[in-house]
Image (cartoon, rainbow, N blue to C red):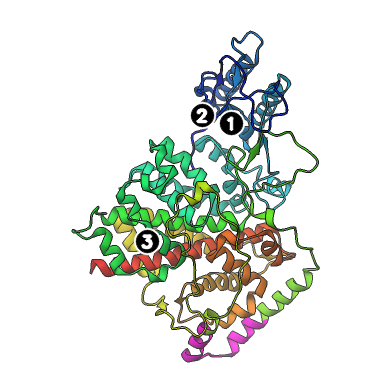
């Protein structure tokens, strides 16, 4: 998401140094967070994102001179680089796709350290705690889309770097996200970011909470809102019931929930256009939480939990203590080749079986019910979320429950033939929020068709049945049934370890740990696992939207 790369940069001069927490000694110096900025021109950082190479070079030289001036012996009052400037330099040194900017930022940090400034260092080696950093950089570093992201947004965040393993999808994702948060629409920009913060907090996703907090403040949001929901306007707080249902049990969303927000007697009242904008933002953030946790996305180097001012030591772990991988060690890599061969064999046998066998509608329903009620355990529950998240969650005990627990009466199944994205949801979204339906539809289509015709070490493979099984399994978990789909295929194609990962990621994303990620598709490429994450994320998004859009449709009748 877009963040301002220049906010808060500077150096500070006052009477004496402020010792840092964890400082190695009084000779080390960096500013406290309460100190004001008064140094390097913020324009020099902004101009680093210029599309003109000469202007970028001039801006880089200007930034260098300003930073070095802050370090010079002639600066009065023991001048110090601001903490924010140091973190900006750290981020540029780690993720800027322009090698000259990346190298210069690293040089400036070294110069500051040589002058006795305590400089930050990143806690994580790369964007993901699950995927080796070298592998991601090898596959994505040459891509133009990363440069475009930096020039447009001022940074290349970890989500973008991992999604860049699938360039076509990333392009659609960035376009949709830009429209949701930046383009003209019924909701003010700071409200959009705050709604995303409320949504991300439901899944304890401090990564997205911090990302959108920056966007919220840059758009003119009031900082006190970030400390408590009670500080936010009543109209925003009135979304909380819909927010928790969308996040955890969207099948419970009914016409009455819409009516309470938009009917003439509602106070405060939402227009349908405002509400659909808010709903899409919430569903987008919820599903993106699944991707963040499911891919082990590490905190950004300038996020809380992404850096430290303490010197490095041999005892340091190679990933952030805030990352999902901190709880588990890597599972042993066993010979997954046999599992791949078994999957290939099952795919061939399934295709042959479907050609030879005609299944009755009753049998199709039975297979769906069997799949829907299957008991799939999820990972161990995490500890309490950080305070910056917990203060933004209402009713934190409200969580996902199986759509149809064994032995209990299930809510009515949503038949895709009765209400679908293609026939109903798409047109409703486009009517209430012009162009957004088209953007979402393109994203759904891209992830549905995305294929490289390979499985692990096998090339030239038709993966359609496997991709469809993943998508339909997610919708099955959310109580959505396709009359023309044989749910027996899900059990044939999705091994139990994959089901555990998928259900955890879709329904309890904050419980996803590296052990669960490593347990499935053990001989597959990491990019193939990220592909599975994208399918789960988009299937979850569409399922949540369908229930809400159906309720809105019923209200409008």
Label 3 or label 1, whichever comes before in sequence order: 1
Classify residue 346 by image quadrant.
bottom right
Q: Nearer the viewer, mark 3 or mark 1?
A: 3
**Looking at the image, residue 434 lies above or below residue 109:** below
The residue stretch that appears in magenta: 349-369
What label does residue 88 carry, if any?
1
* Magenta region includes residue 182: no
Spatial CA distance of label 3 from label 1 is 37 Å
Give the mark count. 3
Residue corresponding to mark 2: 6
Determine crowd level at label 1: few under 14, some 14-19, many 20+ residues with C-alpha closer than 10 A.
many
Give yes or no for residue 358 being in the magenta stretch. Answer: yes
Q: Which of 472 and 272 is in front in this view?
A: 272
Residue 350 rendering spot, x and y as whole percentages: 63, 82
Q: Are marks 2 and 1 in contact (CB under 8 Å)?
A: yes
Query: SS of the residue at dot 3?
Result: helix
Q: Mark 3 points at which residue?
A: 242
């Amino acid at each position: 998401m877009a963040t301002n790369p220049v906010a808060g940069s500077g150096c500070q001069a006052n009477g004496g140094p402020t010792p840092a927490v964890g400082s190695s000694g009084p000779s080390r110096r960096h500013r406290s967070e309460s100190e004001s900025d008064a140094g390097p021109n913020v324009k020099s950082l902004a101009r680093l994102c210029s599309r003109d190479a000469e202007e970028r070079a001039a801006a880089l030289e200007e930034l260098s001179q300003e930073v070095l001036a802050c370090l010079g012996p002639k600066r009065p009052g023991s001048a110090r680089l601001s903490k924010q400037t140091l973190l900006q330099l750290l981020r540029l040194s780690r993720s800027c796709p322009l090698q000259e900017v990346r190298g210069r930022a690293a040089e400036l940090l070294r110069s500051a350290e040589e002058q006795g400034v305590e400089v930050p260092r990143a806690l994580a080696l790369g964007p993901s705690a699950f995927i080796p950093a070298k592998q991601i950089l090898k596959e994505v570093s040459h891509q133009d889309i990363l440069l475009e992201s930096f020039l447009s947004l001022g940074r290349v965040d970890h989500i973008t770097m991992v999604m860049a393993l699938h360039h076509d999808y990333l392009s659609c994702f960035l376009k949709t996200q830009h429209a949701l948060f930046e383009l003209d629409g019924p909701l003010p920009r700071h409200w959009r970011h705050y709604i995303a913060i409320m949504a991300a907090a439901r899944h304890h996703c401090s990564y997205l909470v911090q990302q959108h907090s920056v966007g919220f403040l840059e758009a003119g949001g009031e900082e006190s809102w970030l400390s408590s929901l009670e500080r936010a306007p009543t109209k925003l707080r009135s979304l909380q019931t819909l927010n928790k249902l969308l996040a955890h049990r969207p099948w419970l969303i009914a016409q009455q929930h819409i009516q309470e927000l938009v009917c003439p007697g509602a106070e405060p009242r939402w227009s349908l256009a405002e509400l659909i904008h808010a709903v899409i933002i919430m569903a987008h953030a919820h599903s993106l939480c699944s991707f963040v946790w499911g891919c082990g996305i590490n905190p950004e180097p300038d996020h809380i939990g992404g850096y430290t001012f303490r010197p490095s030591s041999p005892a340091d772990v190679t990933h952030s203590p805030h990352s999902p991988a901190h709880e588990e060690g890597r599972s042993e890599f066993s010979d997954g080749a046999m599992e791949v061969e078994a999957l290939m064999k099952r795919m061939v046998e399934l295709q042959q079986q479907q050609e030879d066998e005609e299944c009755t509608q009753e049998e199709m329903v039975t297979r769906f019910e069997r799949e829907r009620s299957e008991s799939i355990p999820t990972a161990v529950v995490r500890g309490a979320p950080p305070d910056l998240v917990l203060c933004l969650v209402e009713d934190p005990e409200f969580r996902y429950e199986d759509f149809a627990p064994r032995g209990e009466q299930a809510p009515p199944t949503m038949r895709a033939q009765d209400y679908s994205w293609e026939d109903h949801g798409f047109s409703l979204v486009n009517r209430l929020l012009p162009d957004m339906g088209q953007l979402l539809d393109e994203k759904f289509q891209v992830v549905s068709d995305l294929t490289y015709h390979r499985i692990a070490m096998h090339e030239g493979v038709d993966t359609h049945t496997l991709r469809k099984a993943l998508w339909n399994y997610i919708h099955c978990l959310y109580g959505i049934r396709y009359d023309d789909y044989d749910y027996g295929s899900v059990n044939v194609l999705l091994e139990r370890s994959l089901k555990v990962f998928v259900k955890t990621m879709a329904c309890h994303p904050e419980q996803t740990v590296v052990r669960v990620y490593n347990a499935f598709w053990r001989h597959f490429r990491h990019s193939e696992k990220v592909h599975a994450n994208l399918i789960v994320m988009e299937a979850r998004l569409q399922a949540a939207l369908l229930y809400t859009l159906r309720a809105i449709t019923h209200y409008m009748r």
